Image: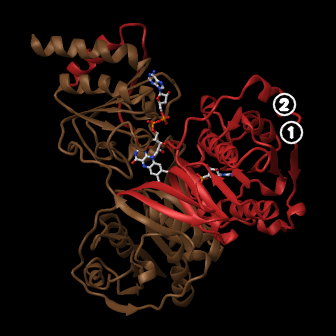
């Protein structure tokens, strides 16, 4: 069985999650090769070679300079058809999710997503997928080849094998529609913000705050607790709080001793950024909010009532 | 301008959705609703329609799902969408990404919309992937995760967040756009809208109507399968309380117990 791993990179560096998936694939005992697509990326191939692949296919083309999914689908389609890969693995990201799903349609291939493990059971590849807000673990498989999979971010750690890989150049050919979308501006960070990664205590706010002005409630509690303030993508996208403070799949990964989630539904993409927290407290007015599945203390109630009181109590306690 | 919105019928969170251990499919027998993430796509479609001038545009809701999905789709009609096209067929049950994207693309081919909108994710599958498969089948440019959408000289511009910050991507029409839940604040249907919704066209089509063979949909047309179900690892004791006015005291107490202060 041969496996192809799609390697993602940003500003001249390979993504840790991609290398983690590469290491995992190698550990399953398959023959593993990697696909590196971009513009002037050949230097990265040698580094990738240290994580287990026997070969790194490099598609180097100016039309692959911007991280847009559709041109990458054209290249991977040709590569998979030529190479006869049985399995194609992706570390989940905004880019690779689009690439993987389009490739599934192109190749009439099964795609399983959000996997947190891959195992061989009687020689058969099985994916482990937490579903329905992680409330049930599902064993998933594929009924045909190639098997495509997206691995949840932060799942596998890279492990160097000390080996090296053959580097092979691959010519890219593109369909017209794949080149129709154009990157106008790339990876622009909106504003500077505080660092939240080292904080012992984090108080996070979501759309349940009702408006940007109510971040004051979260800030006050954070101040009283001596912690930092974080936010969900929904409120960052809406411009209520800076991107630097966002926790989750496309934001920061944090593991404070205490995480207080206020008005946050608890989507998986948020959870992956804070599940390593020591103690999780959630305040949400909807008793069915997914966050209650993984909060150590879940409080069903209105944050506008609870937060000011809690801030007062914490202040009084600290003063005593 | 013609705008199609792909919308899904999903189980209500309050109905505590579960996977049926026998069929290993999501149990869809409980109460269902229009996927909340898709309401944002409907709202964005209505805004595009309104911006294009009275009478010039149409918003059509396209859905693959059981027959009773029609009722849930009425919410979109009440908000202002013009009609619904539902692909509903016994043979479509159990469709995975490959099969669902095939059905949806076939229905969308019929509509020839200038813009096809998707929501951020289906609340029951959490895939956030379907649009890419559909865009590939339709051979159209795609912009996903769009938090801000603008239109200029027949092109759409989407601002979207990735792991590294914000991208701005431009695509000519016809295009496929998937919006994030932060793109807008959806309107509530007016009483008049609710009254009028029932009378708007609601068409149901079968696989045959779309020219799709039985082997191309449902489990036969799918390329993934489910072997078994298990319990998630336990996170230890989780406590859930209702605020009766003393929640703040209880949180403080809990933090002291856990030595988290
Ligand atoms: C590819 C991808 C990447 C993503 N990356 C991230 C990421 O990095 N980080 C992230 O956070 N999200 C991310 N998301 C988005 C994620 O799926 C959710 O949409 C988002 O986290 C929701 O934010 P929220 O909880 O603030 O808003 P909502 O889901 O709208 O939840 C608001 C909550 O507030 C509650 N509420 C309302 N009023 C009150 C009140 N008065 N008192 C108490 N509670 C109240 C409501 O009951 C609700 O549960 C990503 C999505 C995708 C598809
Ligand atoms: N059965 C369906 N019918 C129509 N649209 C759907 C269906 N399933 C998913 N979608 C659309 O695809 C988006 C992403 O779904 P998913 O990739 O399943 O998370 C949703 O927000 C909807 O816009």
Chain A: drawing colour: brown
Q: Are marks 1 and 2 in contact (CB under 8 Å)?
A: yes
- Residue behind mark 1: B200
Query: Image quadrant of residue A318?
Result: top left
Crowding at mark 1 (Cα within 10 Å: few <14, some 14-19, many 20+): some
Give x and y (percent) for residue A294.
40, 35
Distance from label 1 to label 2 (Cα)? 7 Å
Depth order, front residue of A260/A1: A260
Q: Which residue is painted at 28% across and 47% down in the image?
A: A244
At a point 53% along the width and 28% down the height, the residue shown is A288
Q: Is residue B12 above or below residue B108?
A: above
Q: Residue at x 71, y 58 (%)?
A: B95
Q: Residue at x 88, y 43 (%)?
A: B201
Which of the two residues, A298 or A144, is positioned nearer the viewer here?
A: A298
Asked whether the viewer can see residue B195, the reply is yes
| The residue at label 2 has a CB less than 8 Å from ligand 2 | no
Label 2's element? helix
Number of callouts in the render?
Answer: 2
Location of residue A263 in the rendering, given as x and y in whole percent from the top left corner: 42, 28
Residue B118 image offset from top left, x and y in percent: 63, 52
Chain B tint as drawn: red
Q: Which residue is labeled 2 in the image?
A: B196
| Label 1 and label 2 in one chain | yes
Q: Secondary structure at mark 1?
A: loop
Q: Quadrant of residue A40?
A: bottom left
Q: Chain of mark 2?
A: B
**Pointer 2: residues within 10 angstroms few (<14), some, or many (20+)?**
some
Q: Is residue B207 above or below residue B248?
A: below
Q: Is residue A121 visible?
A: no
Tell me the tag on residue A138.
none
Judge by depth and name the residue closer to the eye, A84 or A153.
Answer: A153
Dividing the picture into quadrants, the one containing residue B155 is bottom right
């Amino acid at each position: 069985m041969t496996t192809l791993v799609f390697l993602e990179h940003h500003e001249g560096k390979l993504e840790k999650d991609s290398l983690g998936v590469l290491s995992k694939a190698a550990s399953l005992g398959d023959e593993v090769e990697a696909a590196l697509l971009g513009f002037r990326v050949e230097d990265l191939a040698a580094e990738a070679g240290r994580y287990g692949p026997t070969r790194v296919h490099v598609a180097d083309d100016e039309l692959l300079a911007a991280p847009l999914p559709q041109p990458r689908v054209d290249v991977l389609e040709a590569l998979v058809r030529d190479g006869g890969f049985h399995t194609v693995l992706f570390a989940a990201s905004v880019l690779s999710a689009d690439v993987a799903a389009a490739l599934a349609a192109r190749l009439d291939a099964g795609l399983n997503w959000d996997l947190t493990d891959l195992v061989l059971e009687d020689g058969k590849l099985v994916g482990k997928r937490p579903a329905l807000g992680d409330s049930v673990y599902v064993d998933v498989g594929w009924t045909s080849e190639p098997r495509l999979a997206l691995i949840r971010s932060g799942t596998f750690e890279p492990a160097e094998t000390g080996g090296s890989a053959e580097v092979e150049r691959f010519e890219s050919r593109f369909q017209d529609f794949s080149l129709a979308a154009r990157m106008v501006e790339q990876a622009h960070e909106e504003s500077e913000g505080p660092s939240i990664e080292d904080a012992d205590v984090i108080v996070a706010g979501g759309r349940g705050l009702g408006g940007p002005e109510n971040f004051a409630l979260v800030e006050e509690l954070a101040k009283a607790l001596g912690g930092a303030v974080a936010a969900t993508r929904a409120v960052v996208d809406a411009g209520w709080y800076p991107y630097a403070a966002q926790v989750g799949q496309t934001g920061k990964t944090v593991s404070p001793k205490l995480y207080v989630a206020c008005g946050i539904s608890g989507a998986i993409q948020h959870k992956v950024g804070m599940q390593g927290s020591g103690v999780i407290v959630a305040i949400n007015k909807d008793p069915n909010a997914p966050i209650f599945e993984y909060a150590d203390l879940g409080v069903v109630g209105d944050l506008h009532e609870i937060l000011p009181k809690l801030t007062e109590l914490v202040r009084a306690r600290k003063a005593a | 301008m013609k705008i199609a919105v792909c919308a899904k019928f999903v189980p209500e969170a309050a109905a505590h959705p579960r996977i049926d251990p026998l069929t290993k499919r999501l149990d869809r027998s409980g109460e269902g609703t229009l996927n909340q993430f898709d309401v944002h796509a409907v709202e964005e479609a209505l805004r595009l329609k309104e911006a294009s001038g009275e009478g010039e545009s149409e918003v059509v809701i396209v859905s693959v799902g059981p027959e009773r999905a029609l009722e849930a789709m009425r919410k979109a009609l009440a908000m202002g969408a013009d009609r619904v096209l539902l692909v509903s067929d016994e043979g479509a049950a159990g469709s995975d990404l490959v099969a669902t994207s095939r059905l949806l693309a076939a229905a969308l081919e019929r509509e020839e919309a200038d813009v096809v909108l998707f929501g951020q994710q289906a609340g029951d599958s959490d895939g956030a992937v379907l649009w890419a498969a559909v865009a590939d089948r339709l051979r159209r440019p795609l912009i996903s995760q769009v938090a801000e959408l603008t239109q200029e000289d027949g092109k759409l511009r989407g601002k979207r967040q990735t792991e590294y910050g914000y991208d701005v991507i431009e695509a000519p029409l016809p295009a496929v756009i998937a919006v994030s839940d932060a793109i807008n604040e959806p309107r509530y249907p007016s009483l008049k809208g609710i009254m009028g919704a029932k009378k708007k066209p609601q068409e149901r089509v079968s696989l045959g109507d779309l020219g799709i063979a039985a082997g191309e949909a449902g489990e036969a047309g799918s390329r993934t399968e489910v072997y078994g179900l298990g319990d998630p690892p336990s996170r230890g004791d989780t406590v859930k309380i209702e605020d009766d006015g003393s929640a703040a005291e209880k949180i403080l107490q809990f933090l002291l117990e856990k030595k988290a202060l």
